[in-house]
Amino acid sequence: MWIRHNRVWLGKGLLLLVILLLCGITALGCIGIKSTPEGGSGGAVANGVLYLCPILKSAGGMGCAAPATEAKLVAVNTSGSYLWDVLLETSKPAGGMGCAAPTSSAAIYGTPAINVEEGLVYVGSYNGKIYAINASSGALRWVYPRQGNLQPIAGGAEVALGKVYIGSSDGKLYALDAATGDEEWEFQTGDKIWSTPAIDGDTLYIGSFDKKLYALSAIDGSKKWEFETEGAIISTPLIYDNSVYVGSFDRYFYAIDATDGSLIWKFKAENWFWARPVVCNNTIYAGCLDGRVYALNIKNGDKVAEFDLGSPISSSPVSVGSSIIVASEEGKVYSIDTGNNQKRELKDLEAKVYAPLCFSNGVVYIYANDQTLYALNVQTGVSLWSLPVTGK
Amino acid sequence: MGIWDLIIVQPMINALIALSGYLFNSLGLSIILLTVIVNGLMLRLTQKQLKASKAMQEVQPKLAELQKKHPKDKQKLAQEQMKMYKESGMSPAGCLVPMLIQMPIWIALYQSIMRLVAVIPENFLSLSQYLYSWPIVYSTLPLGNSFLWLNLARGDMLLALLVGGTMWMQQKMVMPATADPKQQAQGKMMLWMMPMMFALFTLSFPSGLALFWVTSNVIRIVIQYFATGWGGLVGAAAQKRVIRDKKYKRRIAQVEEASLDEADIGADITEPSSAQEEGLSYEESGGKRQDRGGGTPTRLRAIRRRPRRSKGHRPKRR
């Protein structure tokens, strides 16, 4: 009798276990991985105003389904006061249990590009829209495309020659009229573009997931040359003294002749290059996801020094006089003296840092993952002010 | 990096990338190959489980006999049943063991796919910390997220139907035939609930994970076929026939009952009942006939004597 009863209970128990297991898949599957893009850009300063797009941090239910969040462009006075924000788009939560890739999110990763002449700020959103906003009032001037969406935009925009240049996950680089948003031309690469373009004169340089760096005419989009690496290129190229410096996912950092695209030298690190390099005192400083900043001789790529920051460097450093200010993912901010190649810790923000750093008038602005904008004195590392900047 | 990432996610990510490197940079193909490898490693366990299922099917008639043999002595019946289960090496939890083992693989696969296909920058950025220093890993990335008609990062309706369909088929093949109505109901619920839930998950999770499920189901169907044949799939047709016959017998019984009130019952009629003819228990054939003690009305004898139940043929009522 007891066995018969036990069998019934065993059957029910097994059924319950199956249900729990299946629910567990959902819960555990979502833990430890983000299913919705959060965005969060670096800051850009013009006329005493800093523009940035906040992180859309949110989690609902089991951490899978994200509630609707609002993508904004925020304007902050460099003295630390909030000026205005403008709502660009409302992200809709992903369908179902939200564990699959979202179909639409208005997260913004690229640092806003400022057009001082037109008085406009440009941002590209992960929902595939490019916005031009009045830098003074926050009013929307134009949006591209006017109907529908492009593929997600993860890089930033660049303004030059009366045009706005921005890449998309559809592999295209778009050149739009800076004043009206009309498309001037587009250039198709072989895979996603998450890199921010760099412009020198009338040449534009852009990296793609197709492992190539392209040099294009910024006027008509015609290709001048291409340079193939062994990995995707997400890092924004640095152009200096007729050379292009860029890191790739093949762990190499390349110096390429800007005229014909030929290799000058390359340097191998231990992991991907994500951040844009900087140059100071004829030395290239390249932050790598292996947690080190490599100081490389600009002429031959020889390693001058390396600085272990202890955690990956995805945030682009800034050059301030004879120093480099760099932040590690863990939130530690360092100053590297390029004279003696010594590093010193300026500040531990105790929050993760992914966004590029921004420097203006002796102050470095860091937007950390705790949704706070920090203003630090570059000499002392003293926190001048901090301001919560959220997507809500 | 935690222990989970270190021993499960990281090897899986690197294995998927390396496999993709040899398989035309196709993440879809590498997921299929990974599924084959995982199922290959679990082959012994799967075979053991299939044997247990087959044993479960084989002991069903004996169970029925036991129930007939000990209709009142429940303790004795339970002892005998226990003995039989032990002898045949059955384990009711057997079917869940492979699922439990695969659970971490599913979760790790989900986490790997979300990172590998560069769905969102945050995940792709974190991927860099999971890579071994193998040259092939760095030269293969990034992986495309297209495979056949699928976007491996998103759910897909057709794949959901495939997951549900193959899972139903596989479950049906494994499901033991049982005479116990409670177990039948439970089995039926499991048969439909699991495929439906997995189909629903397929819509919500990346297709890459569902590709693992559907490939795994197909492999198990093939293994099952070679081990035990079509099993419950063929049995389903037979079961339908049994149900139809039961209905038929019930109808006869109803007609008999109705005619008992009118007809004269001859005490000398000792023709065996339909249930006895078929070797079924009275309980199965409608219950109450055992105690009735009466005979069959003359006009029904003709119906009984007709050859019946061949290829679903139903005798015409006169």
Image: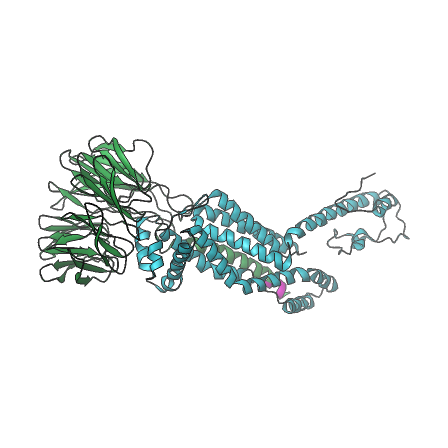
User: What type of secondary structure mainly makes up the magenta span?
Assistant: helix
Which contiguous range is marked in magenta?
Answer: A2-6
Identity of the residue drawn at 32% across and 52% down: B124
Q: Quadrant of the C terminus of chain A?
A: top left
Q: Is residue B187 visible?
A: yes
Residue B66 lies in quadrant: bottom right
What colour do you see for chain B? cyan
Q: Which chain is green?
A: A
Residue B274, percent across and down? Answer: 80, 51
* Colour scheme: by chain
Q: Is residue B238 left or right of residue A107?
A: right
Residue located at (25% from left, 30% from top): A182
Q: Is residue A177 above or below residue A156?
A: above
| Above or below B246: residue B102 | below
Looking at the picture, tell me which residue is in the foreground, B218 or B70: B218
Rendering coords of residue B95 (x, y %)? 56, 60
Of A249 and A98, which appears nearest the observer? A249
In this view, the residue in front, A41 or A208, is A208
Residue A284: image location, x then y, percent = 16, 55
Q: Residue at x 31, y 57 (%)?
A: B128
Would you say B155 lies left or right of A233 here? right
> How many numbered marks, from 0 up?
0
- Residue A120 counted in the magenta span: no
Relative side of B60 to A50, left or right: right
Which quadrant of the figure has residue B277?
bottom right
The answer to whether any part of residue A352 appears in the image is no
Residue A73 image point, x, y percent: 22, 40
User: Which image quarter is the N terminus of chain A in?
Assistant: bottom right
The answer to which quarter of the image holds residue A78 is: top left
